[in-house]
Image (tube, helix red, strand yellow):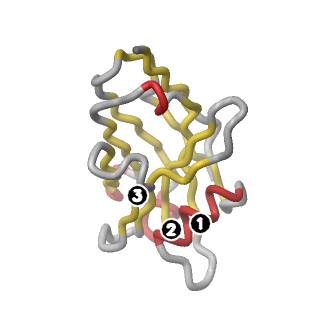
């Protein structure tokens, strides 16, 4: 199983970036997926999560209204559109996938915060300068 992120970079405050995560077909069709981030010295944070059908979607309070998670299962790709970026959004961003029993998007945010999703990528760096 491979999850490969891309799309990170450096932007100024107020800018936008779109992260992508390419996954295997099995994950794309059935797994809950999400994004989490970790900055040096800070706790891991679950940023956004969604089910395979796009009906169960949750965001962290810190990004709600600015970030949008989406997925194109046919293209086996998960996205995170990030607008109105702030310096505090600076972090390594990871995509993750899980399919444990009774999983919901809200629970996946917690799973990612604890650092134990079934699968995760290697990360892509996002840096927002003021």
> What whole-number distance in Å separates the C-alpha atoms at marks 1 and 3?
17 Å
Q: Residues within 10 Å of mark 2 (few under 14, many from 20)?
A: some
Q: Which residue is mark 3?
A: 59
Answer with the quarter of the image where residue 87 lies. Answer: top left
> What whole-number distance in Å separates the C-alpha atoms at marks 1 and 2?
6 Å
Residue located 55% across and 66% down the image: 108
Which numbered disc flags the more N-terminal residue, 2 or 3? 2
Q: For numbered disc 1, what is the local secondary structure?
A: strand
Q: Position of residue 29 (x, y in %)?
A: 42, 67
Q: Position of residue 16 (x, y in %)?
A: 29, 28
Which numbered disc flags the more N-terminal residue, 1 or 3? 3
Position of 61 with respect to 66 (left or right) is: right
Residue located 42% across and 28% down the image: 7
Residue located 27% across and 49% down the image: 65
Q: Residues within 10 Å of mark 1 (few under 14, many from 20)?
A: many
Q: Are marks 1 and 2 in contact (CB under 8 Å)?
A: yes
Q: Position of residue 53 (x, y in %)?
A: 33, 71
> What whole-number distance in Å separates the C-alpha atoms at marks 2 and 3?
17 Å
Q: Which mark is residue 31?
A: 2
Q: Residues within 10 Å of mark 3 (few under 14, many from 20)?
A: many
Quadrant that contains the C terminus: top left
Label 1 vs label 3, nearer the camera: 3
Using the image, determine if residue 32 lies above or below residue 128: below
């Amino acid at each position: 199983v491979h999850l490969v992120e891309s799309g990170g970079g450096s932007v100024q405050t107020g800018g936008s970036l779109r992260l992508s995560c390419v996954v295997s077909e099995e994950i794309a069709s059935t797994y809950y997926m999400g994004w989490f981030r970790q900055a040096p010295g800070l706790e891991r944070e679950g940023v956004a999560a969604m089910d395979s059908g796009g009906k169960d979607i949750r965001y962290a309070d810190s990004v709600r209204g600015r970030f949008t998670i989406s997925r194109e299962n046919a293209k086996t790709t998960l996205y995170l559109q990030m607008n109105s970026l702030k310096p505090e959004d600076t972090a390594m961003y990871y995509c993750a996938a899980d399919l444990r029993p009774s999983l919901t998007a809200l629970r996946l945010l917690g799973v990612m915060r604890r650092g134990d999703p079934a699968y995760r990528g290697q990360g892509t760096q996002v840096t927002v300068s003021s």
